[in-house]
Image (cartoon, rainbow, N blue to C red):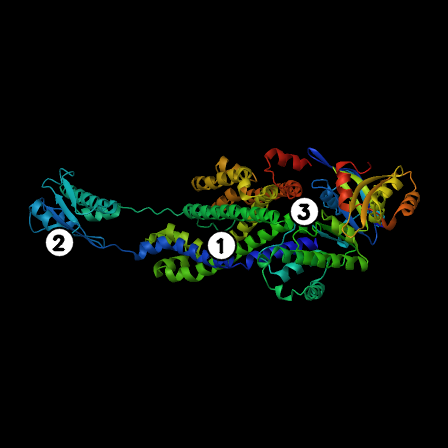
């Protein structure tokens, strides 16, 4: 079941096309990464999903039905550029934002106290917003985004401005929210966080969806059939054994007496034959496929060299 | 709709609880009452030093008849020599020496005033008119008319013009065009002040919300149009609160403070007029009717309440119209500096209207003034300046309706600009951009 289905979204602004026939399907309960270089159209897509921007073509389905203003209350959105009223007190401000999302004053108060205790920030309640640091303000914004327990959470660049400790805290909270049943969409440049917490991604480049799917599938299917081989034995024997079957890209003798080689096997070649041949001639210790990182895939996809 | 309420409430609370708001709201009426009472008070209580003028009268006819008052006292000089007298006056710190020639009755120009310090118009006029009266009397005497003084007393008149307003209402009210003009200018100014001040408050606070990116956070739950209207209505509520407090305070102060400050005899006449006394009878008693009517209407609480009500009607309408334009500009720019070019077409009609209020004083019904009080962009200020002169109700109603209709259209257009503008960063928009956004 997809919580969000965006079908053939096209959005033009005067002078340029921000989204060009983009379709995405966001499965219920997933942590969905929206990747892409700056200016690719991620924020526009998020705004279309949020009903902030109306697309020129295409439509957005929420739970399989066209999205309505009522559905917006089931979404929590943390924009990339986010601010708070500087002159307001933290607690009052949080209550104001929570009430805009449909919570009663009392409900907002109870839930906020819970979160403030959880993050250990109770003493901020009566501080003025202008006295908070950027990271502190980010925490408040995160809390009010998730406070009304929305079914869908959209974070635009949630990690920007967080130190590593708080970024980790945020990651844990995101996973916790997923475990409680929420679906999370977030856009990011931080590829390591994608590998850690995303199960699905869509990569947008130049207004188009160029890559979509499960993270593990994408990584495996975009491997270049490159393997690392560790063994004890003679380099010459190794090269003879692999000759004709695969290409040795790198070779190094480690101090421990171990040799390390990086080999590329053609796709039509059976990996088992190569392993067998190597095993015959040297004492094989390890044979591992190098799975590309999301970072590699991102760069290759954006440069258009993904399928080479 | 619930969200618009929350936005209005937040806006209202933030502004009304500010110290600066509380202080200006309480101090302004005090200042206004003081300013309106000050001229009267100064006239009544402030007296300059009495000025000593010594008179050398070669004819001997004029000097004994010069009458002294609180401002000037005349004394016949002991010496007949001008030079000695001038020196003496200087030594004794007198005001100066008046020299009257021997042939003063036949040659009225033969009179000179020597002053030790700068002279004043009032003193010169006083002396000239006294001498004129004396010479006239002397010349009349030469005709040897019997019972001259009695004849003169019978002939002399003092005209006191009381103005009444001819309307269908039963009682014809005593009206004063000077007061109407004055009140009109004050009301026009109050409106001008509010449109500009509160309009720019709307603009600058939208710019601030845009640049602090709080709008990005709000926009997912609040429709941009609601956000804009919430802001405008919130500020309007603040403005109305302020005017209302001022109105109440001014009414209270003029009912309590003015009677205490004004001298009893004037207050007595005012009370008499309120009680329905015939103003012409008072005029016969030698009361300054113009001043008394003015004071009577200025201290009349019913009159003030009516003015405040109309003021709020036109202020709210005018404010909503201008605030919508200011909001559109605020949403399209990143900084206040960028806004300057775009606000020019907004400020021009306001300034034109403000200048026109002075023309209202001369003739509240001239065609130019009439049309400006109908055209929505200038109407709030000009109409407010005309109202105290007493104009037909249909004109007020028509002007108000036109104003509110235009406001609705303007809000609709501004909403379109706002919706696009709040996401535009980095580029300074032109009028062409705004036009494109409206059609967007």
For the question of whether residue B145 can be seen, the reply is: no
Q: Nearer the viewer, residue B203 or B166?
A: B203
Q: Are marks 1 and 2 on the same chain?
A: yes
Q: Is residue B238 above or below residue B372?
A: below
Residue B92 is labelled as: 2
Q: Are marks 1 and 3 on the same chain?
A: yes
For the question of whether residue B72 can be seen, the reply is: yes
Closer to the eye: label 1 or 2: 2
Calculate the distance from the C-alpha at mark 1 to the C-alpha at mark 2.
53 Å
Q: In screen coordinates, is A63 left or right of B406?
A: right
Disc 2 on helix, strand or loop? Answer: loop
Q: Nearer the viewer, residue A199 or B274?
A: A199
Q: Quadrant of the C terminus of chain B?
A: top right
Calculate the distance from the C-alpha at mark 1 to the C-alpha at mark 3.
39 Å
Report the residue marked by disc 1: B304
Residue A75 is labelled as: none
Question: In x, y percent, where is residue A235?
Answer: 83, 44
Calculate the distance from the C-alpha at mark 2 to the C-alpha at mark 3.
80 Å
For marks 2 and 3 on the same chain, the one whose residue lies earlier in the sequence: 2
Report the residue marked by disc 3: B224
Q: In screen coordinates, is A99 left or right of B165?
A: right
Q: Quadrant of residue A175?
A: bottom right
Mark 1 packing: few (<14 Cα in 10 Å), some, or many (20+)?
Answer: some
Question: In x, y percent, where is residue B144?
Answer: 14, 43
Are the residues flagged by discs 1 and 2 in contact, CB closer than 8 Å? no
Chain that bears disc 2: B
Q: Nearer the viewer, residue B217 or B225?
A: B217
Determine the residue positioned at 10% across, 51% down.
Answer: B88
């Amino acid at each position: 079941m997809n919580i969000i289905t965006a079908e053939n979204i096209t959005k033009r602004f005067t002078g340029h096309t921000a989204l060009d026939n983009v379709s995405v399907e966001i499965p219920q309960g997933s942590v969905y990464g929206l990747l892409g270089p700056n200016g690719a159209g991620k924020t526009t897509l998020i705004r279309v999903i949020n009903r902030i921007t109306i697309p020129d073509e295409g439509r957005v389905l929420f739970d399989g039905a066209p999205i309505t203003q009522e559905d917006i209350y089931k979404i929590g959105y943390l924009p990339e550029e986010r601010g708070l009223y500087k002159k307001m007190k933290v607690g009052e401000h949080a209550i104001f934002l929570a009430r805009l999302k449909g919570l009663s004053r009392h409900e907002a108060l109870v839930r906020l106290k819970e979160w403030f205790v959880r993050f250990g920030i109770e003493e901020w309640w009566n501080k003025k917003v202008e006295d908070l640091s950027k990271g502190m303000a980010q925490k408040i914004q995160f809390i009010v985004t998730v406070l009304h327990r929305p079914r869908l959470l959209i974070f635009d660049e949630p990690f920007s401005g967080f130190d590593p400790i708080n970024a980790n805290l945020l990651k844990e909270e995101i996973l916790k929210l997923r475990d409680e049943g929420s679906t999370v969409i977030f856009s990011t440049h931080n590829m390591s966080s994608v590998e850690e917490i995303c199960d699905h991604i869509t990569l947008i480049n130049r207004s188009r969806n160029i890559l979509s799917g499960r993270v593990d599938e994408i990584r495996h299917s975009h491997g270049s059939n490159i393997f690392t081989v560790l063994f004890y034995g003679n380099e010459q024997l190794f090269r003879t054994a692999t000759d004709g079957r695969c290409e040795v890209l790198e070779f190094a003798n480690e101090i421990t007496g171990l040799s390390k080689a990086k080999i590329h096997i053609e796709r039509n070649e059976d990996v088992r034959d190569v392993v067998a041949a190597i095993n015959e001639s040297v004492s094989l210790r390890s044979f591992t496929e190098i799975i590309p990182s999301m970072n590699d895939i991102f760069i290759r996809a954006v440069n258009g060299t993904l399928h080479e | 709709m619930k969200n618009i309420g929350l936005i209005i409430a937040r806006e209202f609370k933030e502004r009304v609880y500010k110290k600066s708001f509380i202080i200006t709201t309480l101090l302004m009426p005090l200042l206004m009452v003081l300013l309106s009472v000050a001229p009267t008070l100064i006239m009544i209580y402030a007296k300059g030093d009495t000025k000593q003028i010594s008179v050398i009268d070669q004819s001997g006819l004029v000097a004994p008849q010069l009458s002294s008052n609180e401002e000037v006292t005349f004394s016949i000089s002991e010496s007949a020599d001008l030079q000695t007298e001038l020196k003496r006056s200087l030594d004794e710190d007198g005001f100066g020496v008046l020299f009257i020639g021997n042939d003063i009755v036949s040659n009225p120009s033969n009179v000179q005033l020597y002053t030790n310090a700068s002279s004043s118009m009032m003193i010169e006029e006083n002396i000239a008119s006294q001498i004129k009266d004396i010479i006239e009397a002397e010349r009349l005497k030469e005709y040897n008319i019997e019972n001259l003084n009695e004849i003169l007393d019978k002939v002399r008149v003092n005209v006191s013009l009381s103005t009444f307003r001819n309307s269908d209402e039963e009682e014809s009210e005593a009206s004063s065009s000077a007061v109407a003009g004055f009140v009109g200018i004050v009301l026009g100014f109050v409106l001008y002040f509010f449109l500009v001040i509160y309009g720019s408050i709307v603009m600058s606070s939208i710019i601030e919300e845009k640049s602090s990116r709080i709008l990005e956070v709000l926009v997912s739950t609040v429709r941009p149009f609601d956000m804009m209207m919430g802001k405008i209505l919130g500020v309007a509520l603040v403005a109305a609160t302020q005017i209302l407090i001022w109105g109440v305070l001014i009414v209270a102060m003029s009912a309590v403070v003015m009677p205490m400050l004004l001298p009893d005899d004037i207050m007595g006449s005012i009370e008499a007029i309120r009680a329905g006394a015939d103003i012409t009878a008072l005029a016969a008693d030698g009361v300054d009717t113009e001043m008394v009517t003015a004071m009577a209407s200025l201290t009349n609480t019913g009159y003030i309440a009516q003015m405040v009500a109309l003021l709020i009607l036109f202020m709210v309408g005018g404010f909503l119209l201008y605030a919508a334009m200011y909001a559109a500009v605020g949403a399209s720019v990143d900084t206040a500096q960028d806004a300057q070019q775009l606000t020019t077409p907004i400020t021009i009609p306001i300034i034109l209207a403000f200048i026109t209020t002075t023309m209202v004083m001369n003739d509240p019904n001239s065609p130019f003034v009439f049309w400006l009080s109908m055209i929505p962009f200038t109407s709030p200020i000009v109409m407010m300046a005309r109202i105290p002169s007493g104009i037909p109700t249909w004109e007020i109603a028509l002007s108000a309706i036109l104003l509110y209709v235009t406001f609705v259209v303007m809000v609709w257009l501004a909403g379109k600009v706002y919706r696009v503008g709040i996401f535009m960063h980095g580029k300074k928009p032109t009028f062409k951009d705004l036009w494109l956004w409206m059609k967007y």
